[in-house]
Amino acid sequence: MSNKILAVDTATENCSVALLVGDDVISRCEYAPREHTTKILPMVDEVLAEGGLTLSQLDALAFGRGPGSFTGVRIGIGIAQGLAFGADLPMLGISTLAAMAQGTYRIHQSEQVFTAIDARMDEIYWGQYLRQADGDWQVIGAEQVIKPATLAEQLGAAEGIWTCAGTGWESYAEALASIPAKMEQGTVLYPDSADMVHLAKYALARGETVAAELASPVYLRDTVTWKKLPGRE
């Protein structure tokens, strides 16, 4: 049976929706800071209409679980939960960092990816990913929030060439340049639901669904003394 999975993500400045039907992906993606709440549901309607499906015909609903903007992550989970409740669908939380690794493979065919999202407060959300033979991804170590200079000091030598993805590389270029690895800059800055549905099919096969009321974010930060910056969340 072909998987039918809808994914929504608003965890970063990107706003995206994707529908997986078998091996086909129908997607919408737009850079839309502060406009997630007005854009996401029309995107959902568009991909479902294009795919000729209703929510009740899906196998699962995936969402960007974070890390990312606290507000953005909460918006995405809230919208996804509302859709899942209404259609009685199980949910799948997908890492935004892993999604960027998959996006980097989709665009650059890179199988070793360093992902870094600017977490503000002189920190990054970090993940190191290695593509597996079946197309899934293995996280090396653990996703974490960390100061770039500390990461560069603690990270062991990594063999091969690693492609860099995410906004953290531009924000903390000098500190991250000292990571002990051969690196090349990719073009992926934000997660995309088109890549989340790819990851979601593996999560669904592993039985990692949760009921809508149990869907939860992964912030990586436990406590935050939040500093508002102009134009920032």
Image: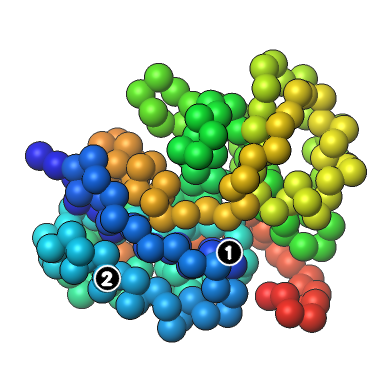
Three-letter residue code for mark 1: Thr
Q: CA distance from mark 2 to mark 1?
A: 21 Å
Quadrant of the rendering where the N terminus is positioned: top left
Amino acid beneath label 2: Glu
Residue 174 image point, x, y percent = 89, 43
Identify which residue is drawn at 24% across, 45% down. 24
The percent coordinates of residue 75 (x first, y second) are 48, 74
How busy is the neighbourhood of tag 2: few (under 14 within 10 Å), some, or many (20 plus)? some
Task: Look at 35% across and 23% down and name the residue there.
Answer: 134
* Badge 1: residue crowd in 10 Å (few <14, some 14–19, many ≥20): many
Residue 80: image location, x then y, percent: 35, 68
Colouring convention used in this rendered image of the protein: rainbow
The residue lying at 20 percent from left, 49 percent from top is 21
**155 shown above or below 158:** below
User: Which image quadrant is residue 162 in?
Assistant: top right
SS category of the residue bearing label 2: helix
Residue drawn at (38%, 42%) of the image: 199
Q: Nearer the viewer, residue 215 or 33?
A: 33
Q: Residue furthest top?
A: 159
Q: Which residue is mark 2?
A: 46
Q: Position of residue 198 (x, y in %)?
A: 35, 42
Question: Which circle marks residue 12 in the picture?
Answer: 1
Quarter of the picture containing the C terminus is bottom right
Q: 69 and 198: which one is in front?
A: 198
Q: Is residue 61 above or below residue 130?
A: below
- Residue 139 visible to the viewer: no
- Eye-nearest disc, 2 or 1: 2
Circle 1 SS class: loop
